[in-house]
């Protein structure tokens, strides 16, 4: 069994790095705050005699050597980066639960047959550089390294430059074989809390599509241009958003739709917006239904644009297909939860996770614990210490079993 | 009569300063580009033997001495600053038409009884620092200097600092008496073009209200938060904009409504927006109707907020009351247009102008010329050289008459 108090204390120590005034965390990927968090984690791993390497996209791998040095490692992990104003547990919980598992091995003086590693994936959030889950995508060969390195943040700084500034790029090879990958994470949704379960046995992840939308109207003077002759990009976007909300209702309750970014070109109070860009995040557990959801959104956008005399263009920015997890790994998590006497249920992940990419590389699954009100990507994100401990115990058992296979 | 070709050439020379790639101008107030435009203008005035002063908000006054040095001056003018992506004529036309008037006096070797000045008002556009028409407001005692100096742009640079950087603050006293003020300007609307008139005799300006709106919902994860339990600030704002559009329709055709700025706090593609700020520009020729328009907008905002479980707060940012112009000045413009044989009509200004503030200080009016398609606050802003010449001739006659009164 893990030491729940030590895990919680470690979570609070990490939360002090890049703390926000409202009790959340701001450690954007490859920022000085992110680096400070990584350095603390590395120091803790080194104290346990773990070896630390990184790859060219800055993913970290901290290895606790097994008795059979030729056998592929069992890997745990998640991410330490956060949203611009994120919570204290998204990603961090999975990394520190994994550290607690190794500490428990180390305290007990035991070594599994296979080595056990903790992976810290670069840029899981996708908030500073898109897409999300970048480091795991490059590791798993889903995104070419060169493409990832070119991505820029809103200040025009590339991933390549940020990696150089923060000095995280190393030599560890991409696509090295893993025996299996287990990621513990907060659910970030309300399902477990509502059904009063403490462990989610994650059977897969839903499909995600990110679209880039541009609306071109005509900028003109706010005080002299008759309402009837305007081609106001902002009012057009508002009408589009209302239509998109109606489309989403047709795909309820599984279908989800979010406009997270919206930027007016050259905004000014007394100028009718002429050009607007916005993002659209669409999700559904079923790839085919998501494809239909996507096309109905495009039809709705085109109809509003036509009616208002504005131009709309829609480009796919990123796609992540629905991903089933490995049945052996899922079963190990399920049995561990049952053996430990924790109330659990099977669940599909609404969020994208590094595990979704790693599932293409090796047998993979995830363990969810509840978060208060299902709130995440918010400074108010909160979990129970008891649930944190239970999730880490399930991780311990599942990994121990697999690593001695 | 003025020299139309010289006026046009001078307009094109100014348009070369801060030129944008789409044929417009970007000379934000108190930027290096704005300063370059001012320096060119000052050099041209000095060639005519005019004396140049400035006041503490950076308004410029270039004086062509009359025969009676104790008589109050007749002042012409407008502004040289532009929108972030503005046109070549908004403001600039009034300043350079005034310069052409003085050149015509100078060529003819004549001096009116009263001195004639050209005023270049600081920050008319309100794009970099709000509110619009700042320099004329401070001159006319409508806004305290200290308040204006504190206003900051989106980079946190204050008017005070920008004035120091660009070195435009001088000693000329605020509120010095003027005999009268005449401002030539492009209409920035479609009225003159539609009625095929070339001169607008401006009888006053409509009322303007600027509101600041904040909408607070709840930020949460885009992939895990069921649509039914979201408090999405962006979808709320979209619904609000649709309602505001409906309110505006009830005040058609005079009522005008524009959302020119909209900012999501900590935007991220996969985070439901939790907090959004936006601007609202409301206009109507009648103060009382505008007040009703304003309250109906607030009611509509509150109703949407209530229905969606979000908070909305509305603050008045700026108010400019409907302003009638002086009948002697208006009549002089009207007679000049008639005498010159130009097709003219009386018109109310939809845009705010420095003349609106100066009207509180001395007898004032404006002269409008058409602009293509009524388009302004847009790089595509365009006028006919012939109309530019006609407007300057009307200005010449009206000012000459008043200055010899
Ligand atoms: N877990 C998480 O917040 N991932 C970011 C990718 C997503 O948008 O789902
Ligand atoms: N003329 C002009 O564009 N003025 C700016 C103030 C306004 O918004 O009307």
Image (tube, coloured by chain):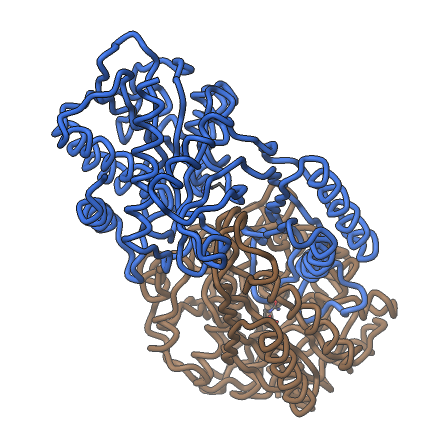
Chain colours: A blue, B brown
Residue, far right = B195
Percent position (x, y) of residue A34? 29, 39
- Classify residue A211 as left or right of residue A391: right
Please tell me whether residue A123 is drawn above or below residue B3 in the rendered image.
Answer: above
Image quarter where the C terminus of chain A lies is: top left
Quadrant of residue A174 within the rendered picture: top left
Q: Position of residue A26 (x, y in %)?
A: 32, 49
Q: Nearer the viewer, residue B70 or B204?
A: B204
The residue located at (33%, 66%) in the rendering is B160
Indicate the quadrant containing the N terminus of chain A: top left, top right, bottom left or bottom right.
Answer: top left
Left or right, residue B292 beside residue A299: left
Residue A131 versus residue B252 in the image, above or below: above
Q: Residue at x 12, y 29 (%)?
A: A47
Give A16 or B290, whichever is nearer the viewer: A16
Where in the image, quadrant-wise, is ligand 2 located?
bottom right
Tally of numbered tags: 0
Query: Does residue A346 lie above or below A361 as drawn?
Result: below
Does residue A132 sit above or below B126 in this rendering?
A: above
Q: Quadrant of residue A22?
A: bottom left
Left or right side of B43 for B6: right
Tell me, yes or no, if residue A172 can be seen here.
Answer: yes
Residue at figure coordinates x 64%, y 49% from the top left: A254
Q: Residue B253's quadrant in the figure? A: bottom right
Q: Position of residue A269 (x, y in %)?
A: 57, 66
Most extreme residue toward the top is: A70
- Residue in the foreground of this view, choosing between A114 and B210: A114
Is residue B40 visible to the viewer in this orientation of the structure?
no
């Amino acid at each position: 069994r893990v030491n729940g108090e030590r895990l919680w204390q470690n979570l609070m120590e990490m939360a002090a790095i890049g703390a926000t005034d409202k009790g959340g965390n701001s450690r954007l990927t490859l920022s000085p705050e992110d680096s400070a968090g990584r350095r603390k984690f590395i120091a803790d791993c080194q104290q346990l005699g773990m070896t630390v390497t990184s790859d060219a996209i800055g993913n970290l791998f901290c290895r606790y050597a097994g008795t059979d040095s030729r056998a592929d490692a069992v890997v745990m992990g998640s991410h330490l980066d956060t949203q611009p104003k994120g919570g204290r547990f998204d990603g961090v919980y999975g990394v520190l639960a994994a550290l607690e598992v190794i500490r428990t091995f180390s305290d007990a003086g035991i070594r599994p047959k296979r080595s056990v590693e903790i992976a810290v994936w670069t840029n899981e959030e996708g908030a500073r550089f898109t897409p999300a889950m970048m480091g795991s995508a490059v590791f798993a060969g889903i995104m070419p390294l060169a493409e990832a390195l070119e991505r820029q943040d809103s200040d025009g700084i590339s991933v390549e430059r940020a990696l150089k500034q923060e000095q995280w790029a190393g030599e560890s090879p991409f696509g090295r074989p893993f025996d299996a990958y287990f990621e513990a994470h907060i659910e970030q949704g309300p399902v477990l809390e509502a059904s009063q379960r403490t462990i989610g046995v994650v059977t897969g992840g839903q499909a995600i599509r990110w679209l880039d939308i541009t609306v071109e109207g005509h900028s003109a003077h706010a005080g002299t241009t008759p309402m009837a002759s305007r081609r106001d990009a902002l009012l057009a976007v508002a009408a589009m958003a209302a239509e998109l909300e109606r489309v989403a209702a047709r795909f309820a309750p599984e279908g989800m739709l979010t406009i997270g970014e919206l930027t007016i070109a050259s905004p000014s109070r007394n100028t009718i917006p002429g050009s607007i860009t916005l993002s659209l995040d669409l999700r559904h557990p079923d790839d085919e239904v998501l494809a239909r959801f996507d096309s109905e959104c495009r039809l709705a956008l085109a109809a509003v644009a036509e009616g208002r005399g504005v131009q709309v263009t829609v480009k796919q920015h990123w796609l992540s297909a629905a991903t089933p997890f490995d049945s052996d790994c899922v079963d190990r998590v399920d049995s561990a939860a049952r053996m430990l006497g924790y109330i659990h249920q099977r669940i599909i992940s609404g969020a994208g996770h590094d595990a979704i990419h790693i599932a293409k590389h090796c047998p993979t699954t995830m363990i969810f614990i509840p978060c208060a009100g299902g709130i995440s990507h918010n400074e108010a994100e909160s979990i129970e210490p008891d649930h944190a401990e239970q999730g880490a115990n399930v991780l311990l058992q599942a990994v121990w079993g697999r690593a001695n296979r």
